[in-house]
Amino acid sequence: VKEIGLPERAVVTTCAYCGVGCTFRAEMRGEQLVRMVPYKDGKANRGHSCVKGRFAYGYANHQDRITSPMIRDSIHDPWREVSWEEALGFAASKVQAIKAEHGAMALGGITSSRCTNEETFLVQKLIRSVFGANNVDTCARVCHSPTGYGLKTTFGTSAGTQDFDSVMQTDVALVIGANPTDGHPVFASRLKKRLREGAKLIVIDPRRIDLVRTPHVEASYHLPLQPGTNVAVLTAMAHVIVTEGLVDRAYIEERCEIDAYEDWARFVSDERHSPEVLEAVTRVPAADLREAARLYATGGNAAIYYGLGVTEHSQGSSTVMAIANLAMCTGNVGRPGVGVNPLRGQNNVQGACDMGSFPHELPGYRHLSDGETRALFEKDWGVSLDPNPGLRINNMLDAAVDGTFKAIYIQGEDILQSDPNTRHVADGLAAMDCVIVHDLFLNETANYAHVFLPGSTFLEKNGTFTNAERRIQPVRKVMEPANGMEDWQVTQSLANALGAEWSYTHPSEILDEIARLTGSFAGVSWDMLQKRGSVQWPVNEKYPDGSPVMHMNGFVRGKGLFVVTDYVPTDEKTGPRFPLLLTTGRILSQYNVGAQTRRTANTVWHPEDLLEMHPVDAENRGLKDGDWARLASRTGETTLRVTVTDRVAPGVVYTTFHHPATQANVVTTDYSDWATNCPEYKVTAVQVSPSNGP
Ligand code: SF4
């Protein structure tokens, strides 16, 4: 401000990083953004923010931004800058030629959880109604797809049950597989406030995250489980609750399918599921686990918050359902202060899922096999839809290697960095005839692209994001797009180059279409959001003011469904060659693959990914703090600097995945969740040895 001068105007908009969804005033002087100020009336953040949001504007004007469309015939050719018309025509002719020769199943796309609801809605509409198949997926595949499966199965809808305000009525918070202090900092502040007021905390995490012990906050129990044993820990907790008679029987009888409950209760009561027996697997002291279970069941309003440490496992969906079982058996769903709350990673991962970004579901989580739903969309869009589910991203890549999948449109995601087994992703992309990357920067994936369509930042567009508490919030244009087009306009232009006749003139018209076709959004409109600021879905005739807490008067599916979740060990095993288990996570100042945060002032706080290692493991390998180490798995290897710390237990190592120089996913495996194919990023058998550096 000192250098640029005082702001002349401000635009209220929504942060485009994490699923908290903080509201900011973007303060402008002329066409220059002076600063981002957390907005006191923002319902998700109430005047707070973290360092990522405050400096987010840094990447919007970064010199690496690509603002002209580019094309090339081969990935070995140099890029050619061309007009929008030529780039879109080039992309359309390639897509049309591939469709004519190989059919619609050779085409697909990926929606971006960084983009608005309106933009993701349009991409899935493009894939289904113009490309002609349902080969659409999203980055939730690699993060919260098990949440979608698990919560839909048990509760009837794929979303968290509570609003963030609810935490102020929580007596016991159980945080499992999440690190809110780094991943969801503004929510973490609210949680810590409640903990300072006396609420109790249970942390289930292989690593001693900050929340375990931070000024004026100490967890009652930290259960440092062996990576990959979430289901065993939750089953042992359920064993204690059921066998000690701590269940809420009246709630279960009134709200849940009783036969399914009885089956589940019999299963968890078996002695082989006791904490004492499972201790050999989980490495959690049985006495601590028993006490933690008692506290969760009897401590008052109990709320579960979880993250990717739950979902990114071969048993991700089972773990989500085990969490739901625990909440239902203690009567902790359907009122303020309790519930099951996935802490969504990306700003609009909830929205991207809501908008039909999965190959088997139309917007609103309605399965393609439902003829009535299909007919609704077919009538509105004036096309016939393929009733068969399409390919998931991993299946698209497999099919590309096999020669049957030929073209992909990737909206705002760097799959070469973010998806598991980097080599396989590269092989899949290299095998395609047409890769269209729509992004802000020439990311790693763009190395395999034939068409690059420059994207617009959250500061350059109108639309809506939906945060982790189902809050639909407006995103307002602060400045004109550097590339001349908002992302929804790019997708519309591509659709029209392929023969469609879309004519949206503002995202509000797309939002109207979403509301028309999606029951949970039926009461939403752009005008309504300008007046109210935000609203939580479902918002419709039944809930005109939205729904801060879900399942208040019964579950969305009717009766809650208990599901037996047997612990099945991962196929990823340690052994003499790979004796350590690697798990991964985030750090406060960086965001995912770092495409944005590495181009802001945040880089000074975390210039490289580090490998955390227990002092005993480090000493055994002759490694000291700051030494370079080679990290190798059965899949690949990389080089990182070591941090020696007892935050991790012996036998466990940990790193972040923000920097392309590290490419942590070079070492992660192909194993994935049995139900959704969400990759098992959190468990990789590795070896660490001294290195001279990269
Ligand atoms: Fe808020 Fe998340 Fe943005 Fe930080 S990154 S300002 S917590 S929305």
Image (tube, rainbow, N blue to C red):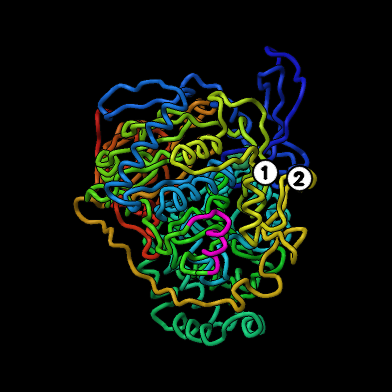
Seen at 63% across and 31% down, the residue is 54
- Mark 2–mark 1 distance (CA, rounded to whole Å): 8 Å
Seen at 69% across and 29% down, the residue is 26
In this orientation, does residue 631 appear? Answer: no
- Identify the image quadrant of residue 437: top left
- Left or right: where does residue 202 sit relative to residue 2? left
Whether the residue carrying mark 2 lies under 8 Å from ligand 1 is answered with: no
Callouts 2 and 1 close, C-beta under 8 Å: yes
In this orientation, does residue 418 appear? Answer: yes
Q: Where's residue 309, x and y in %?
A: 46, 55
Pointer 1: what residue?
508
Residue 62 in magenta stretch: no
**Vertical comparison of 511 with 264: above or below:** above
Give the main secondary structure, helix, strand or loop, of the magenta stretch. Answer: helix
Number of marks in the image?
2
Residue 380 in magenta stretch: yes
* Magenta region, residue range: 372-383
